Amino acid sequence: MSRPLDTRPRGKLGPLENLIFLSRWLQLPLYLGLIAAQAVYVYHFCAELVHLIEAAFGSQHALTILVENLGYKANPILNAEGARVGYEQIKGLNETIIMLVLLGMIDVVMISNLLIMVIVGGYDTFVSRMNLEGHPDEPEWLSHVNASVLKVKLAMALIGISSIHLLKSFINADKLPDRVLVAQVGIHLAFLLSAMALGFADRLLERHLQPVRNGH
């Protein structure tokens, strides 16, 4: 038995369909929440920058805050039996601390970029078109973004963030347990494999849909 044709005008929705379609606006508080999280990240970045500048000018209090936030430890103090009894006091910025702070700030920037990608791309894809065509600040990636492309871009951004964390751990490797480094390398490899799997699946889907788009 053939399915009856829908004689409603194109774009005209029934009450139930209209309710279901309007439910997409329930995602709006989620994106607004991500914007609030972005503001928290901006505050964290500015606070870290102020502490770095103060520590560069000799503030021991700012240096202590930086070191505690980084989890960085100075060279250990050993007793006569060779057991660790404490750590040397850090009296000023050194190259390792500066590099760890900068990597942490880069990490904040990359996560912030990830948030923007999710907020703008997700809103435009799943909630409402933003009509940014022709706008001088239109993101280059937004013109061809869809759910599949967004997943791949998010996976690539996560790989970048994981790389920063891994580099921070390697710089401070002598202060970290081996199991922590092994776990971080394993997580990073898992992100890499996941991104490769997503890209491969996206390519297979694109190849499958190409004949349909061409009318074959």
Image (cartoon, rainbow, N blue to C red):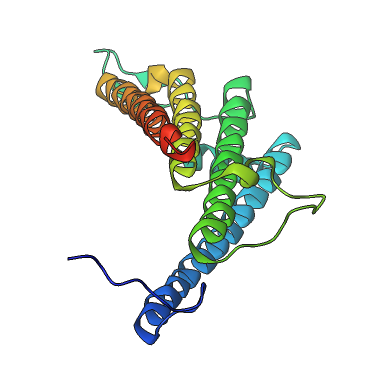
Q: Position of residue 60 (x, y in %)?
A: 63, 41
Q: Position of residue 31 (x, y in %)?
A: 51, 64
In this orientation, which residue lies closer to the viewer: 15 or 90? 15
Q: Quadrant of the C terminus?
A: top left
- Looking at this rendering, what residue extends furthest in the right direction? 136
Q: Is residue 125 visible?
A: yes
- Looking at this rendering, what residue extends furthest in the bottom direction? 15
* Residue drawn at 65 percent across, 62 percent down: 130
For residue 141, which quarter of the picture? Answer: top right
Task: Count numbered badges in the picture.
Answer: 0
For residue 195, which quarter of the picture? Answer: top left
In this orientation, which residue lies closer to the viewer: 81 or 6? 6
**Does residue 115 sit above or below 81 in this rendering?**
below
**Does residue 147 sit above or below 17 in this rendering?**
above
* Residue drawn at 63 percent across, 21 percent down: 95
**Does residue 114 sit above or below 104 in this rendering?**
below
Q: Position of residue 25 (x, y in %)?
A: 47, 74
* Residue drawn at 63 percent across, 54 percent down: 42
- Looking at this rendering, what residue extends furthest in the top direction? 81
Q: Quadrant of the N terminus?
A: bottom left
- Looking at this rendering, what residue extends furthest in the left direction? 1
Q: Position of residue 2 (x, y in %)?
A: 23, 65
**208 left or right of 215 in image:** left
Q: Is residue 71 visible?
A: no
**Does residue 208 sit above or below 113 in this rendering?**
above
* Residue drawn at 37 percent across, 32 percent down: 208
In this orientation, which residue lies closer to the viewer: 116 or 4? 4
